[in-house]
Amino acid sequence: MSEKKGLSHGAYGGVSGDEYIPFIPASEAMPEATIVSILLGVLFAIVFGAANTYLGLKVGMTIAAGIPAAILGTGLLRGIFRRNNILEANMVQGIAAMGESIAGGVIFTLPAIIIWGFELKLSTIVFVTLLGGLVGILFVVPLRRYLLVEEHGKLIYPESMAAAEVLVTGSQGGAGFRTVMTGLFGGGLYKLLSGGFRFWLEEPEWTIRPLQGTIFGVDAMASLVGVGYIVGMEAALYMFAGAIVAWLGLIPLIKYIGAGLTTPLFPATVPISEMNAWQIWSKYIRYIGAGAVAAGGFISLGRSLPTIINSFRSAISGIGAKGAAQKRTEMDVPMTYVIIGAFLVFFLAWFIPVVKTGPIGALLAVFFSFFFAVVSARIVGLVGASNNPVSGMTIATLLFITSVLRFTGYTGDAGMITALVAGAIVCVAIAVAGGAAQSLKTTFIIGGTPKYVEIGMYIGLAIASVFVGMVVLMLNRIYGIGSEQIAAPQATLMSMVVKGVMTGQLPWALVIVGAVFGVMTALMGIPILPVALGLYLPIHLSAGILVGGLIRLFVENRFKDNEKVQKEQIEKGVLLASGLVAGDALMGILVAAFAGLGIDIAFGGRIAPLITGSPWTAAIVLLIFSFWVYSFSTKREG
């Protein structure tokens, strides 16, 4: 590869997309879809898919896979395979990003079947992912040129540009690979010692007796420290604010008012006077939080409606835009594939037994997949895939599909499952379309061949879907989805939406109270979804994320007088945090596997129970670990 210094200024705009010369020009041919790049991409798709499945089911969040995969892929290609090929590295990150996308699409929806008490089969997860992923990628193809080339400089695709910068700097060497791997091993070791060997508690908590016996706790987990560092102090504070309202406000209030009741208050089955803080959270607060999250989703969707409408209109008008189709960098899979794929998904969704949405569900699934794939592909160009409102679009989809199915005679348990499966196909399509558009923008900037990346992405999601499904079922078998350990917040919300529309048997008063909280937050000009998520989730999660946010704040203040150095050190910390999250999640899956096999490795809790079982021990270890993260993030290279 010819020696280059970095991306040109034209990569960020200032020139039309047709005039932009990629980092690797179209006239320069290099290997892309090689056995090595595809295998590495599939491996990382599996790793980040499994990690995000665990993380998302636990805290309702996923982490971006493209940038860490770009670093890891570049490092492995250079270090082990001795191949300094940026197009192969781009292929790796494009395929790997599908792991995160399908994890979000699956865990937001399908675990609701388990929450309802029905069996969720691995084949259902795999086929839903294959169908939703296929239309998610294919529906971006006719829009690719318009969104990525003609709108070059207008749609920024911030995370795509970050991935492109990582690929360029990585191809020229750097410490990013070592930083991610340090986080990976550090997060994994921390999880093994705490969640595996039980040398200290993972969820220390303290009872606050003056506040009606409510509790305050913190999830002393490396993954949450990493998540907090990545999202930053502001988002962490919003989440923590919602948690304070729930656990230090609403739970004591409910306990105080209900202390004199001698009969259960719906939806609980025991009197409030006999309930502890966790039970009150489970039976009352979660519905209030669900109302707030739903309101936040709808308000965010409403605010985005002009953008969504304009995005859809503009993107549709770009279909069929002509360009230099013979150039390597303009090659897509044929349009006939798009048409055949849409019909194939319709018929398979209709007739495959483990999916079987019926003709109406299949038709609505394809229609909403196309509509919201267009929207998703454009929105990530504005705010990035990490901020793509997938849940809001999925809620809107489920409301419409469930209402139509109920009106046409699909009722009861079968109707709910049909609505949810159809909505899950759409949810996967939305998430995959956003991830695909993001990866294809990076491909455009670097100078890769879109066709190869499009095919590679589907290979990656097809294989990773099996492992994502296996992790979902394993976590359910060991912990139970919907439990304190695996709360599955998004899937629980979707289950409430579908069941509420289909049966009307919900404590609507609590849901409406939560919606009022969401409206109040919006009127105050505060971001709704972080506050609502804090209201919905245990305070332990928000407190753990706040720790990571505080570390980032300290790093920012350490270098506040030098903006350039500050940016470099924050980015170093983000890479370390990404590794922490992945390492914690992967080790968490391994620990869960030991538990599933009946192998007890928690010997630490039996050595000195007064020490290992004390919440203060966990607090001290978390403080030491946080200081290490801060020290590593502030240490300057060289």
Image: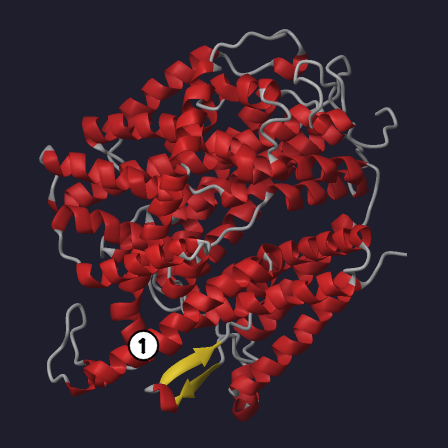
Q: Residue furthest right?
A: 638
Q: Which residue is mark 1?
A: 251
Q: Up-down: is 227 above or below 419?
A: below
Disc 1 packing (10 Å; few <14; some 14–19; many ≥20): many
Q: Position of residue 386 (x, y in %)?
A: 53, 45
Q: Is residue 182 left or right of residue 97?
A: right
Q: Position of residue 91 (x, y in %)?
A: 64, 31
**Residue 180 visible at all:** no
Q: Position of residue 202 (x, y in %)?
A: 52, 75
Q: Position of residue 273 (x, y in %)?
A: 21, 85
Give the residue drawn at x 55%, y 35%. 382
**Residue 245 visible at all:** yes
Q: Up-down: is 147 above or below 571?
A: above
Q: Nearer the viewer, residue 482 or 563?
A: 563
Give the residue drawn at x 54%, y 65%. 545
Q: Is residue 33 left or right of residue 288?
A: right
Q: Amino acid at mark 1?
A: Ile
Q: Nearer the viewer, residue 538 or 353?
A: 538
